[in-house]
Structures are given as C-alpha cells and as structure tokens.
Amino acid sequence: MAETTTATPTALPKGFRGAEQGWPHLDRIPHPPRRVPLLGDVLGADRRTPLQDTLRYARQLGPIFRRRAFGKEFVFVWGADLVADMADESRFAKHVGLGVANLRPVAGDGLFTAYNHEPNWQLAHDVLAPGFSREAMAGYHPMMLSVAERLTDSWDRELAAGRSVDVPGDMTKLTLETISRTGFGHDFGSFERDRPHPFVTAMVGTLSYAQRLNSVPSPLAPLLLRTATRRNEADIAYLNRTVDEMVRTRREASGSGAGDLLDRMLDTTHAETGERLSPENVRRQVITFLVAGHETTSGSLSFALHYLARHPEIAARARAEVDQVWGDTETPGYDQVAKLRYVRRVLDESLRLWPTAPAYAREATRDTELAGVHPMRRGAWALILTPMLHRDPEVWGADAEEFDPDRFDAKAVRSRAPHTFKPFGTGARACIGRQFALHEATLVLGLLLRRYELRPDPAYQLRVTERLTLMPEDLRLHLDRRTATAAPAPVTVPDEVRSEPRCPVHGTDD
C-alpha cells in the first residue's frame, strides 16, 4: 500500500472540505448521470429522504461513488473491503461530517459531535466509561424494568379501549424516560402526557433542522430558513434550560444520583490528570446522552416490532425462548436478559436492515490509498453508508434484503469478515452506550413478547422518516393480550452459543 509521509503536516483547510480537496483521482469514482450545472446531482432527489435517495444511487453506482450538491462533492463508501480498510485506526479517524457538525450549536464538543483534536472528548470518555461497566449496567436494570412497566400499563389501557398503539411514539417515551431516569434521575412524565414532552419536540426540531441544512446551499440558508432558524434557536434554548435545571437540582441535592452518569459528570476527576468536566461541557454531554441515548434506541425497537409483527413465525420462536428462559419469573434479572439469544438476533437483524444511525464519516489521518486503489490526502473523508454495507450481497448473500435473524447465530457471525456489521460506528469513537442500548432493547422486546401478540395493519407499507436518525413512519400495531403462558416450547441452544454473549460488532478493535 502506497504511503506518503511529511515531516511537518500542512494545516487542513478550515470549514467544509469537498472531495475535490482530498481525492486526487476523483474522476475514477462514478457519479450519477445527468448532472445539473450548479445544482449537481439533484434530479429526482427529495430533501425529506436524502439517505434513501443516496441508497438508490448506491445500488446503481457500486461500492464507492460520489454525489455533487450545490457545488459540494461528497464521496460515499459501502463496499465491505473498503469499509474494513477505513476501520484502520492507524490511518483513519472519525470525521465530523456536515450533518453531525450541524448539531454542534446544541451539542458542542459532546462525545458525539466533538472534533478529534478537542480535549474534552477524551476527558469525557475516560470519566464516563465506567458508567457503562457491567456493574453499572446491573444497577440500571431495575429502573429499566420500572419504565417498561409504565409502557405496558399504557399499552394495556389502549388494548382495553380497543385501540392500536403508536409504536414510534411510545418507544420514544420509553427510551427517553429510561436514559433520563437511569442517567440523570429526571422524570419527564412522558406516559402521563397526551402529547410529546416539549423536550422531545425541541429535540426533534433540532435534528430536523440539521437535516434541512444538508439540503440547502450554505450561503442561502439564512434567507431560505429564516423562520426555521429562529425556531431552532428557540429549541436549543429550551434544551439548554431543561438541562441546566436538571444540573442545578442535582447540585442542590448534593449528589443524590447514587453514582449515575450525572454524578460522574459533576464529581469525577480524571484518574491521571485530575481534570473535571466544565459546567458548559456537562450541559453538552447531558444533551448528547438524552438525544443520542434515546432517539436511536427508540427507532431500533420500532423497526424490530414492525418485523416481529410481519413475521409471526419469528415472533413465535422469540416468544418461546422468553417463556423458556424467564419461565414464571415476574421480573427478569439482569443476567436473564443476556440469555435471550434469539431475541437479540431479532434486534441485530433489525439493526442490520435499518441501522438507526445510518452513516458515519471517516477521514484519512495521513496521505494514504483506500484499499490500494484510491489515493487520499490527509484530511480527505468519506461517508460510510451503513444500510448498504449491511446489504452487501457478497457478505450477506443474495437474500440480503430479507429479514432473517439466523444471520446472527454464532456460527454465521464467526464466518463473516470483521467490520461488516457497524450499527454503532467503529473504533475509538464508536458509541459509548451501545451495551446500554442493547440491554434495554433486548429487555423490552422480551417483556412485550411475553405479554402481547402483535398484529400489523395489513394495509401498512413501511415508510422511513429521516431526521439524521431513522424511524418507521406512522407505524401502529394491534395487540392481543396473552391470557396465559403455555408450557414453553423447547428451544435448542447449541453448545457453541452457551458461552457468554458476544458483541456482533465483529472485530478486534471494537
């Protein structure tokens, strides 16, 4: 592989870096036909579904391609070999792409939106990582159960009234309450409200605004989005006020969170440097966790419930596992959740088809070649399309578009190359809360399968809403209460699966 080194690296250009600045042989990378002067590849594009438009181009143009919009050139990657090469932490690092950078007015140098050179990222990561240890997770488990009970109480009421349930709306309530109560000791009262909590409304507003900025020429944004910009500023102000009040309440209570994430943010010093998070950074980290810690998990649960309702044979198999593993236990313990291996496969397969954080960007940390073919200068970056990586037929087979949880049995996982399943990003900047999200989602799916039969609306066709994250649109399900748990059907668990559960984000550096 060709490498070029320099004694003193030149400074990277400030602001947005188009592909023309970092890819010397951009002409080797295909682009859509019929480019429009000035506007670029916009024919047939829908600003509400930019990701799904890009997936359509990906199928046409192959594992690496480019698109041009309003004078900006973007490179997209999804081929498994290319993605694996970009996972090399010695040559590539996280790139804060345009969509993520649009969130910096609200999240600043929080864990998700920080630039690599900003010191608060590593400080916050080191301070907060123990908050996601096995011991910490076991401590969160009772609160997760408590919030899940509020969900089932709500669904019981809807069932008694003969109404279907709003799956994305209720999963949003569930995951917001879970992260806010376990991490910050705050109750938004989501299940007691007829409408979404104003925090959710403001959060969705900021995500939607960031999405809109991606499809508007930068010089024209202040003019074209004048009203939306004012509304976004009000949304950010509300988020800030809400979090500041949470922090003030905790400080006055002198650490009543029993070592939760907020306590760690306020009281923990770095083990080596003795540094603490600044008050401004605490606010940014809390907002980051409240937004990222519930928005993606609610989408993952919603997609999983959609597929379970559409595949009753898979739901029956998952339900049989829950009956066998949990038995008559009213409240499953922490360790019992990890034993739901098939339920976890259902979740993983949902994340494969619709990873709710559907892309992540990587940039070259030195001059290099991507897969020995495409030269890249230091600072050149590409956006990795996770839904297309997860549909690569060379990895997942000719039926890659089909829903099949057995893709994640232990033997199948071992047979796949590293870096082919990336719902939580990659490397040092991968999602810090992934085990929290996976435990919460597996627990909730188990509880719902044990309690209800799920019936879809026969006329419903899956539509996906994009607001930087992905969510099923207008998904409602009908419920039937299981009157009694039948004798558990035997579920064969191969010996190879009886060991401790392993993370399917497969790779030594993950």
Image: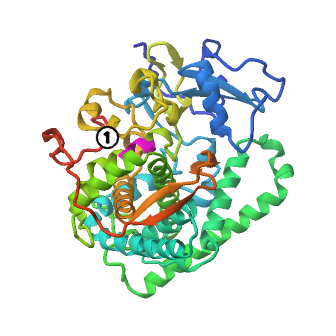
The number of numbered discs placed on residues in the rendered structure image is 1
Q: Residue furthest bottom?
A: 252
Whether residue 431 is in magenta: the answer is: no
In this view, which residue lies farthest toward the right? Answer: 223
Against 37, is 471 above or below? below
Where's the C terminus, which quadrant? top left
Q: Residue at x 57, y 65 (%)?
A: 164
Residue under the image location 79 percent in, 28 percent down:
43
Which residue corresponds to the image point at 62% horizontal and 63% vertical from the top-left? 203
- The three-letter amino acid code for the residue at tag 1 is Pro
Snapshot colouring = rainbow
Q: Relative to the observer, which residue lies in front, 283 or 5?
A: 283
Does 99 sit left or right of 263 as displayed?
A: right
* Residue density around tag 1, few if under 14, some if 14–19, many if 20 or more, within 10 Å: many
**Which region is colored magenta?**
346-351
SS label for mark 1 = loop
Q: Is residue 340 left or right of residue 231?
A: left
